[in-house]
Every structure is written in C-alpha cells, then in structure tokens.
Image: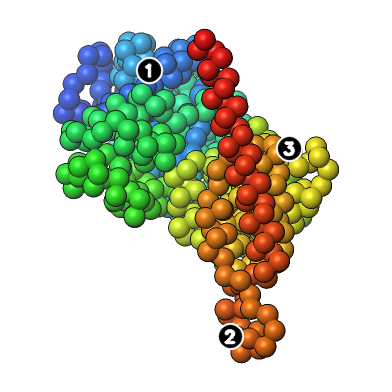
Amino acid sequence: MHLSMINQRKIDRLSHHIKRPNVVNAGEGWHVILPNAPSPFFGRNHLVSHVAGLLLNRQHVTLCGPGGIGKTSLAKAIIHDPLIAERFRGRRFFVSFDGFDPSKLSTRTLKEQVCRGAGLVPRFSERWEEVMTFLMSECTVLVIDSANDLAATRNAESVARIIDDFASSPSIVLLLTTRSKHIFTSCLITQVVSVPTLERKYAKETFEHLCPYEIPAEIVDHLLDDVDNHPLSVNILARQSAQHEWTGAELLSAWQTQQAAILENGEGKHQSLRASVELSLSSPSVVRLGDDARKILEIISFFPQGLGVMRAKALCFSAAAIIDTLCMHSVIHREGNYFTMLKPMRLYLRRKSPKPDAVFLNTVRNMYHGELSGSVEQRRALIEAEDINVEHLIVFDFREAINLDDGCRACALFLDNLAMYKPRATDLTTMLQELPVRSSGLLTKIVSRPVMKKAVSASNKNLLVKSAGTLASSVRRSKLTSTFLRTLFVR
C-alpha cells in the first residue's frame, strides 16, 4: 500500500500504542522515554549549540570520532538542549545499537529499535509503512547512535534504503553518531562534525568532579597529558582513583606501574579502553584489511611521534588503502605530515604488541639510517622533525640487541647530528655507558654466543663515547647561550 493511501484512522490507531514514560516532560501530546542528559558534561556546550543550530535548520548531522571520545554523551546532551526540546517537544527519538553484534544486525533489528525509540510496540515493525507515516506526520529529530554498526550489516543496502527514507522526509532530521566518517554516502548527505578530545581545563573539571579526593594539580596534569584528555580515559582514571581512595602519590605510582590495566578495567565500551578499542578493530571493514593492517597499527603505535606519511605508505603495497580505511574509522588520524593515534590507543596497542613486525620496522629503520648519513638538508630535517622517533628506535635496538654494529654507527650519527641541529640531553648517553664491550683474541672463542650478540666492539664503543662527548659539549654551549640571552633581555 502506498504511504499516501493510509487513512488517518490507521495513524490514530497506531498512535494509541505509544508507551507512556514514568517521567513526564514539558511537551504537549504523547511522550517517549529519552536517555538522561549526560553527567558530568563539561566543555561541550559550544558543540551542542553548533549541532542544535544545524538540526534546527533542517540539516542532517553526523557526529564522528574514535571510541570513547564522547559522541553518545554529546548526542544525549543535544536532544535535551532547550531549543531542540522546544522545537521538537515529544518528537525527539533516540535509537541506540549499543551492545548489538554488528554481524547479527538486520533491517528487522533496525525497524524494531526505531519503534522502541519512538515509544511504539516493537512488533509494529512488521507494519513499517504505517510506522513511517507516523514518523513523518510531524517534525521529528531521530538520533541513531552507533550508526557505523548498521553500515557493517550483511544487508547494508536494505538498511541504507531505510536511512534514505528517513533522510528524504521533509519532517525528519537525523543525528547520527559513528566512528566512521563516511557511512551511507551513496544515499545520505550530512554535516560531519568531528568530536575532539576535551580541552585541558574541562578534562580537569571532569576528573575533579568524579574524584572528590585532593590530588595535587601537577599530578592530575601529568595524567591528563598521558591520556591526551581523552574523555573515556579521564573518566576511568578518576573513577579508579575515587574507588581506591588513592592519594596523589598512590595514584601516580599505580599509573606508572599498571597504566593499561587501569584503563582496561571494567566491562563494555563505556567503562573499558580495551572494549572500546577492540570494537573499532573488530569492525568488519577493518578486519577485511587483513594482517597488514595490524602490522601498520603496531608500527604507528611504536613511534612516539607517529609515522611520516611517506614512510607509512612505503610499508607495503596496500599500505595507502589500509591507512585510508583506518583513518576513516577514526583508529588513526593525520596530524600534518604524520599518521598518529590518541595516546590511550597507543598505550593499549603497545601493551598488546610490545614488538612491532620486524619486516615493517626494518623498512623504517633503513629509511632513518639512510637519512642520518644523507645530505645536510636530510639530516637537519630528520633531527628537527623526528629526533624522538629516531632515539626511540635506537634505544629499542640496543635493548633487543638488534644489529648492534649498525646500531652503533647510527647512534653515533644521531648524536653528532643532534649536537649540531638540536642540542638536548638524551637517555642514550646513560645507556651507552652500560653497553658491554666485545672481547677480542683468544677470549672471544670461549665467550658464549648470547653474550657476544649483546656486546659491541671496542672501536664502536669509543666512537659512541666520542659522539656523546660532542653532544654534551654542544648542550653546555646551548645552555650558556640561552642564559646569556636571558640576561640581555632582563637588562
């Protein structure tokens, strides 16, 4: 039956089946049960106002971002915004797919959840034309939470057609939350709003609201730095601290010794970093990328500064396509000329895979080693932009005793270039002093092979000591110059 042929009596009959909530809102007409407004909720008012303005102007909106960034909380705050409440009153419907297995979602599941969100009996999903007429009978804002799960269903095309029906209606405006930047792109045009991490002051307010105990400000700042002001991680840290009644020193000690364990504590994506990250990694479109996707994630998480765009795309033949998909699903993101990820994601992946794929790592190692002995422009650019990455790789190679002779030469070059282009202290100088020297002559034949592999030649040790001395002198000169310039300005 065509929608226009459904008579008003059927619509009225359907409307009688709307559930009556326990809490009556201020609107007129029927009422539905909405999720509560989020609490605590700091630092997002500008986003609420921006998105509410778009919805009031009849524009569909997609809230996009990585797991734990606060998309669902933001959507809940938006439907409770006074302007949205005044405009749509009882026609604010929140449809969630949180907790559903994406592989088992279907058009029937979608229809039933929409019915629930609209206050209708789920079995009315079998009379979908009447439900659609009911939804389109007045101005309605329809929130679809975790919409990325719908795009991953086996019958995604049928789901897309339903979403298109919603979007095509002049009386329905959509608000989607998703980890993927582009879903239902063939049928749905939306304003994409990327949800960022919290500003520091609001991350601090959130922490202090959830943890009533006195924690020194410098410790809180240190912890918030370590989690990139990531809302879920801030919440978990604060609740763990409050639960254990930790002092500042105890909290800092627990964080330094069991970071990942603290963030992984709890069940579900709203309480556990592990659950949130794995939800992204288990997305069918990510799984289809195969083992190379895992290896690329390991490499990007391994380097503290992320990985340069050209280096990342040189890892394997399919690297560019894999990286595009990982970015699309908010697993990684691009900052300037680098692909990187949020620190909590990096922390989880580093704990899960402490040693990245040897072949991929060697590809990047060869690039760095080549540039350390390259032209002046190459060396300067590398040190100024990626000195932390290079240092991290050299430390790893020494600890794992990987190609020590090559590592010694690379380390000496790194220290010399650091002294020339970016004088600063480095943990490498302490590590170099502890490097064992390989014995020579007759003693070499009786030393066990494992010890030999972890030792360096006397000539390489001398080379490293010399380069470390050059760096130390350069650092001292740099400090004296800075002190002198500060004195000039004071005068």
Q: Is residue 462 left or right of residue 67?
A: right
Q: Quadrant of residue 110?
A: top left
Q: Is residue 260 visible?
A: yes
Q: Amino acid at mark 2?
A: Ser
Residue 82 percent coordinates (x, y): 31, 12
Residue 280 percent coordinates (x, y): 49, 48
Q: Residue at x 57, y 78 (%)?
A: 451
Q: Are marks 3 and 1 in contact (CB under 8 Å)?
A: no
Q: Residue at x 50, y 35 (%)?
A: 65
Q: Residue at x 83, y 43 (%)?
A: 375
**Mark 3 or 1, closer to the camera:** 3
Residue 257 percent coordinates (x, y): 34, 55
Compared with residue 363, is residue 210 higher up or lower down, i.e. above or below? above
SS type, badge 3: helix
Compared with residue 38, is residue 404 higher up or lower down, i.e. above or below? below
Compared with residue 61, is residue 237 higher up or lower down, i.e. above or below? below
Q: Residue at x 74, y 38 (%)?
A: 380
- Give whichever of discs 3 and 1 has the lower sequence position: 1
- Give whichever of discs 2 and 3 has the lower sequence position: 3
Label number found at residue 381: 3
Q: Amino acid at mark 1?
A: Asn
Label number found at residue 45: 1
**Mark 2 or 1, closer to the camera:** 2
Compared with residue 390, is residue 4 higher up or lower down, i.e. above or below? above
Tell which of 263 and 378 is nearer to you: 378
Residue 231 percent coordinates (x, y): 38, 35
- Give whichever of discs 2 and 1 has the lower sequence position: 1
Between the C-alphas of marks 2 and 1, the distance is 65 Å
**Mark 2 or 3, closer to the camera:** 2
